[in-house]
Amino acid sequence: MRGESSVDLAVVGGGLTGLWTALRALERGQAASVLVLEADRIAAAASGRNGGFADASLTHGLANGARHFPGELEQLCRLGRENLAAAAGTIAAEGIDCGLEHGGTLEVATAHWQLAGLEDLARLARRCGERVELLDAEQVRARVHSPGYLGGVARPDTTLLVDPARLCWGLAGAIERRGGALHEATPVLELSASRPRGVELRTPAGKVRADHVALATSAFPPLVRRVRRRVLPVWDYVIATEPLGSDLRASLGWRGREGLADAGNQFHYYRLTPDDRVLFGGYDAVYYFNNGIDSRFERRPASFELLADHLVATFPQLSGTRLTHAWGGAIDTCSRFCAFFGNAAGGRAAYAAGFTGLGVGASRFAADVLVDLTFGITSERTGLELVRRRPLPFPPEPMRSAAVALTRRSLARADAREGKRNAWLRTLDRLGLGFDS
Ligand SMILES: Cc1cc2nc3c(=O)[nH]c(=O)nc-3n(C[C@H](O)[C@H](O)[C@H](O)COP(=O)(O)OP(=O)(O)OC[C@H]3O[C@@H](n4cnc5c(N)ncnc54)[C@H](O)[C@@H]3O)c2cc1C
């Protein structure tokens, strides 16, 4: 973007949160003119490179929701379900070709100590009115042919699978059809309150005066101080196989095409793509000193090799299969694992960040919260503790790096010792704090 402009709503960040915010503001008739400013390209960051699990959970899973918001868990589950259904509605209405699949999820135990957690999950899911099936080893292996599975929980309605980059590009098209504008290669360098038009955003070659501003900058250095100590970028890595031939594909079973995840502290998530590759990610959660974000971190051979080994351990059938893709992306981690919100610039700006690796579905809900907060609208959403309360900040460096390293080591040790949590993890649990991808 070059030059100066004035708009009703400026959105900073062209990932799922920013794109949904622009679209929801237009759909809800809150803003006549909307501008999205993206430093890189639309969907260049996490939103274009994630696993594509669009989950109904607004709280990074039911157990985390029950831990932090016990009094509003059922309400959050309902809002999450409504949100996911509305996202699917938009995808259909706008004709967004993002490979949408209704496979649901299958969470599997690969160690005996994980089985109790799966039973708790099934109980919580039932409490929230979900369809859920608890499976023993034989039943889960009959669905997906991995020799390591010891049990599972199938939740057919809780997750949609999408190609997230194509979802973003489709949302960008929908914004433009409603008269919104998108500017790529336009980093916002500074935000300041301005009168009489609300907020001023400075970019390298221009200036935007906006009545209202939504900040959706995720794991990147935030424009407001309040977010700075509450988000840290955690790098998550993914590999993908070549498309499987029909025999190999059949050898996996997996006819329901569910999104899969195992139940360790350091967990993997995996799925089939529309062209029948296996996408396999997670496990390592890597933090680089001082909230490191750099394109160099997108490739980490050690993590790719580990994932390749774990893929073959999960599916020995794939031992000769070629890996064609490997990549990484930054996750906006906060200490309570789910998005937090707030106002800035005298109430004319609002921010959402901290999805901690489960933002594909929740970003649409966050978008509605951002519209509420930046336009001063009171809604069911703005009354939620989830929206009103913010997570505890992380300590500054070098304590931050030390705490993350200790937590990672402790989680790995817990996985190796039948889930037994050491004193450090128990302290974090008591304080409602954590570190995750
Ligand atoms: C490898 C990986 C796998 C994942 N898998 C899943 C999954 O399966 N399911 C799930 O729910 N979630 C998953 N996630 C998390 C999910 O991708 C994120 O929660 C979600 O995409 C967050 O969207 P966002 O728009 O908030 O952030 P982003 O997609 O990171 O977008 C933020 C954008 O803001 C831009 N920006 C930052 N600062 C500025 C500035 N000053 N000016 C202009 N632009 C700026 C950035 O360039 C970026 O494009 C995964 C993430 C990764 C990295």
Image (cartoon, rainbow, N blue to C red):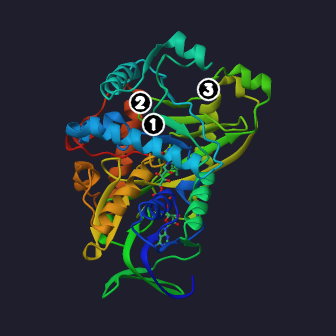
Q: Is residue 169 above or below residue 77?
A: below
CB atoms of marks 3 and 2 within 8 Å: no
- Residue extending furthest toward the front: 29
Q: Is residue 158 above or below residue 232?
A: above
Q: Which mark is residue 246?
A: none
Which residue is disc 2 drawn over? 415
- The local secondary structure at tag 1 comes to loop
Q: Ligand 1 closer than 8 Å to the CB at disc 3?
A: no
Which residue is disc 1 drawn over? 266
Residue 208, x across and y down, in percent: 45, 83
CB atoms of marks 1 and 2 within 8 Å: yes
The quarter of the image holding the N terminus is: bottom right
- The local secondary structure at tag 2 comes to helix
Looking at the image, which is closer to me, 289 or 240?
240
Looking at the image, which is closer to me, 421 or 430?
430
Distance from disc 3 to disc 2, alpha carbons, whole Å, reads 16 Å
Looking at the image, which is closer to me, 392 or 196?
196
Q: Residues within 10 Å of mark 2 (few under 14, many from 20)?
A: some
Distance from disc 3 to disc 1, alpha carbons, whole Å, reads 15 Å
Residue 17, x across and y down, in percent: 46, 58
Q: Quadrant of residue 112?
A: top left
- The local secondary structure at tag 3 comes to helix
Q: Ligand 1 closer than 8 Å to the CB at disc 2?
A: no
Q: Quadrant of residue 277?
A: top right
Residue drawn at 76 percent across, 24 percent down: 248
Q: Is residue 300 above or below residue 156?
A: below
Looking at the image, which is closer to me, 72 or 299?
72
Camera sees residue 43: no
Residue drawn at 31 percent across, 50 percent down: 335
Distance from disc 1 to disc 2, alpha carbons, whole Å, reads 7 Å
